[in-house]
Image (cartoon, rainbow, N blue to C red):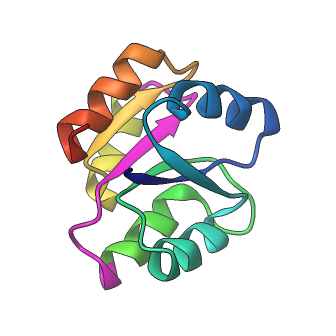
Amino acid sequence: MKRILVAEDNDSNYMLMTYVLKKNYEFFRARNGQEAVEMALSEKPDLVLMDIKMPVMDGLEATRNIRKENPDLPIIALTANAFDSDRVAAMEAGCNNFLSKPINADKCNKAIRELIGE
């Protein structure tokens, strides 16, 4: 089963992600950007769902740091900010896709499948 790192500091948003992912994927959580970088490198997930606004290190910086060590790891940005500038910033940081919150389960699963399959 594919493993997904969910980088999300908000408990209610994380609970929603567990609902979206639980049938098809194993998942584990980082509560801030620094943890996300460390876990992405040590736990070797198949994909990262990266919240952009997090404490310690934001998701854009975390993505840039992950990219230095693992340029091929699929990363999907998750953010409440759905402006084009936010999408551009996420893609420039190295994200493969961008989803706005609140997360739509079908769109999220489709985006994951496009990057890592079933």
Determine if the magenta segment contains residue 111: no
Stretch in magenta: 68-83
Q: For residue 77, which quarter of the picture?
A: top left
Front in this rendered view, residue 101 or 70: 70
Which residue appears at 69% of the width and 37% of the height? 14
Q: Is residue 78 left or right of residue 92?
A: right
Q: Is residue 71 left or right of residue 90?
A: left
Image height check: is 98 above or below 109?
below
> Where residue 60 sits in the image (x, y, percent)?
47, 59
**Image mark count:** 0
Which residue appears at 38% of the width and 50% of the height? 1
> Where residue 34 sits in the image (x, y, percent)?
64, 73
> Where residue 115 sits in the image (x, y, percent)?
21, 44
> Where residue 15 sits in the image (x, y, percent)?
72, 31
Image height check: is 46 above or below 89?
below
Determine if the magenta segment contains residue 78: yes
Which residue appears at 42% of the width and 73% of the height? 44
Which residue appears at 26% of the width and 37% of the height? 118
Q: For residue 76, which quarter of the picture?
A: top left
